Amino acid sequence: MRVKHSRCMVLSLAFLFLIVFNTICVQSVMATPPTQARGAHTSSGGDDYGEYRYLAEGYTGFTSNYVAIFNLHGDSQTVENLYTDENGYSWKKTFNIGVGGNRRATREINSDIGVKGRSIATRVKGLSGSLMAERSSYVGYEGTSSSGTHSPTRGSWYFPEGYTGHDLYIAVRNCSDNQQTFHFMFYLTSGFYRDVTKTVRRSCRGTIRVNDFVPSDRDVAIEVWSTGPFTAERSSLAGNVATSSSGHRYMGNSEYLHAEGYGSFSTYISMANISGWSTTGTAAFFDSQGRGATRSIGIPQNSRRTIRQDVFGSGVDFSTITASSGPDIAFSSERSSYYGSWGTSSEGTCCANAVVKRVFAEGYTGHDTYIAVCNASDVSDRTKFQINFYVRGSGVYNGI
């Protein structure tokens, strides 16, 4: 089966398969990941890079946190990291990236603020030009990653995935200079459940534990709403299994692209319909040759549904395109994969936002690191991709 969608051009997704590796040097501020890291984490990267990057999640208790920063400015530049917690405390660190542009740097959040047990949001600012940043966190042997956003939203933020059999959290970063009241709305398979509010100080981090408001062992989609600009992130923890996602800034009657998928993993596609009409959600799974099949499920109004990938068996790489039927449907999807004692999750990319350039700030060759590319264009049967790698401290390394 050949799957083609004319409204989409290119999506790429970084898939990081972390394994135990040899001892490395972890510096206090310009850092590399912990030596015990294994499991996996994924990131959709970003095409909305610019002067700022906002990252909602980070906890300096049992979690080690890092911010990877890619300087897209044509020359070296000074970068400012502003860390804020839920009580109004802030820490500011200023540093220089490289001698010349296209450099990668890493900051260790825990060392930068020097205080344990704080829930932290991060604002990364390039004082001279554009940058891309991603947050990676490690809980024991497990890692998670998030790309955050360059453009904080006004209105709603959406998370199709969520399960209260795990410890489930939503972190928000109030990006305005005024106090904001946030609405957290929960949608179960049976429909809308409840609305919870939380007030967050200006330029601060706020967190809710979803389990405190939704019964256990429930699939849940979450909408976060406020009148001012903010960013949000979902984190989930079950034993040593940790996942996170940046969610979607808006929902529409569009397609979503999930470039990563591997048949040896248990993979689920969560779909949310936050509208007043029922719809049919479809997930088209296809391998590197364009072969595959489509699975569909009915989604009532204001509800969440899940499709498990059962098209491909062990060892097959695949991508997924999701869509909904009918006009005026507020629809989005998310991919989650599990293997043994670890899991990953990714929001993918809305087809309406797909572009021909995507940037990933994170990557470490002490791990097995993969770039998965989905050609969802019907312009031609084949598309050539240019992939450039940039090494910390030396700029461009190679291109393929």
Image (spheres, grey):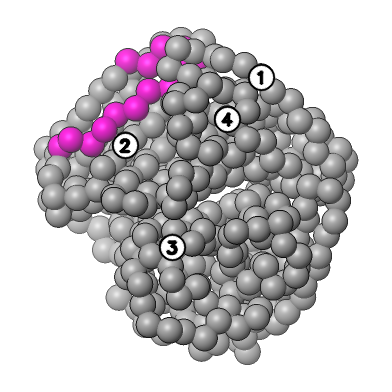
Labelled pair 4, 3 in contact (Cβ < 8 Å): no
Look at mark 3 in the image and give the residue it sits on: 141
Q: Nearer the viewer, residue 52 or 83?
A: 83
Q: Which residues are magenta?
A: 298-311
Residue type at mark 4: give it.
Answer: Asn
SS for dot 3: loop
Between label 4 and label 2, give the one nearer the viewer: 4
Residue type at mark 1: give it.
Answer: Asp
Labelled pair 4, 2 in contact (Cβ < 8 Å): no
Of the image marks 4 and 3, the number of the one nearer the N terminus? 3
Q: Nearer the viewer, residue 23 or 160?
A: 23
Residue 373: image quadrant is bottom left
SS for dot 2: strand
Look at mark 1 in the image and give the residue it sits on: 195
For the residues marked 4 and 3, what is the alpha-carbon distance in whole angstroms?
Answer: 24 Å
Residue type at mark 2: give it.
Answer: Tyr
In the rendered structure, does residue 257 fall within the stretch colored magenta?
A: no
Give percent across and percent down for residue 283: 28, 32
Between label 2 and label 3, give the one nearer the viewer: 3
SS for dot 1: strand
Labelled pair 3, 1 in contact (Cβ < 8 Å): no
For the residues marked 2 and 3, what is the alpha-carbon distance in whole angstroms?
Answer: 23 Å
Q: Nearer the viewer, residue 21 or 98?
A: 21
SS for dot 4: helix
Residue 211 — which label? 4
Between label 3 and label 1, give the one nearer the viewer: 3
User: Crowding at label 2, few (<14), some or many (≥20) Cα neighbours within 10 Å?
Assistant: some
Question: Taking 188 as reference, is 312 left or right?
Answer: left
Give percent across and percent down for residue 112: 72, 72
Look at mark 2 in the image and give the residue it sits on: 268
